[in-house]
Amino acid sequence: MKERPTIKTIRLVLRPFTLADAPQVQQLAGDKEVAATLVPLPHPYEDGMAEHWIGTHQERYEKGELVSFAIVLRATQALIGAIDLEISRQHENGEIGYWLGKSFWHQGYATEAAQAVLRYGFEVVGLHRIHANYLTRNQASTRVLQKLGMREEGCLRQHLKHWGVFEDMGIYGILRSEWAIQRQGGSVL
C-alpha cells in the first residue's frame, strides 16, 4: 500500500483522512450552507456516507487518480474541511476542489490549503495545468481562485442543476509556467 502524503503549512496540516474522521466530516459537510456551495456534496449527509467516501481515497490514490487531504488546524488538530486534487495523467492536469466547515470560512484557510496543493500538483505530481470548477454565485471561491493566481477561463451558463435550480459553473485555471513565474515574484498578466 502506497503511503499518502501529508503537507504542512503555517497554520494547517493536510493529511490523509482516516475512518476516525467520519463523524466530523458528516457534521461539517452536513451543514446545509456548506452543501449549498458544492454540487457533488450530498444533502442531507447521511450516516455511512463519510465512511464510504473516505474508503475510496486509498484505491484512487494508488491508481494515480486522486489525492484527498483532510484540512486540519496545526494548533488544535481540529478537522476543518477537505481539499482534493483529481488527476488526469493522460493530459497532465488536475482539478482542485475544497470545502470548509462554515465556522472556518473567511479566515484564509482555503487559500492556504489550495496554495499547498497547487505546489504539490506542480512540483511532486508534475502536472502541466490545474483548474477549478465552481458555482459562480460562490464569490468566496472566486476570491480564493484569484488569490491563487488562477485565470478565469470561462463560464458554462446554467450547466448544472443543483437542488432544482440551474446554476452557472465558472472555470479558473493556471499553467505550471504561470505558477512558476508567480512564485518568483513575477506577473503572468
Image (cartoon, helix red, strand yellow):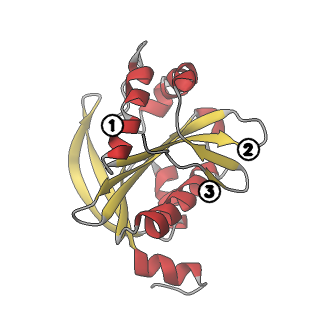
Q: Which mark is residue 74?
A: 2
Disc number lying in front (2 or 1): 2
Q: Identify the residue at horizontal 35%, vertical 69% (top origin).
A: 129
Q: Which mark is residue 39?
A: 1
- The N terminus is located in which quarter? top left
Please state the horizontal and vertical placement of residue 183, each as a whole percent of the image: 57, 78
Q: CA distance from mark 3 to mark 1?
A: 23 Å
Above or below: residue 173 compared with residue 35: below
Q: Is residue 60 left or right of residue 70?
A: left
Q: CA distance from mark 2 to mark 1?
A: 29 Å
Name the N-terminal-most of marks 3 and 1.
Answer: 1
Q: Is residue 32 left or right of residue 94?
A: right
Q: Identify the residue at horizontal 40%, vertical 27% (top origin).
A: 55
Whether tag 3 and tag 1 are in contact, CB under 8 A, the answer is: no
Report which quarter residue 90 is drawn in.
bottom left
Whether tag 3 and tag 2 are in contact, CB under 8 A, the answer is: no
Name the N-terminal-most of marks 3 and 2.
Answer: 2
> Looking at numbered disc 1 in the image, what kind of residue is underneath it?
Val
> Looking at numbered disc 3 in the image, what kind of residue is underneath it?
Glu
Disc number lying in front (3 or 2): 2
> Looking at numbered disc 2 in the image, what kind of residue is underneath it?
Arg
- The C terminus is located in which quarter? bottom left
Please state the horizontal and vertical placement of residue 35, each as a whole percent of the image: 43, 31
SS label for mark 3 = helix
Which one is nearer the viewer's eye here, 165 or 20?
Answer: 20
Above or below: residue 120 compared with residue 64: below
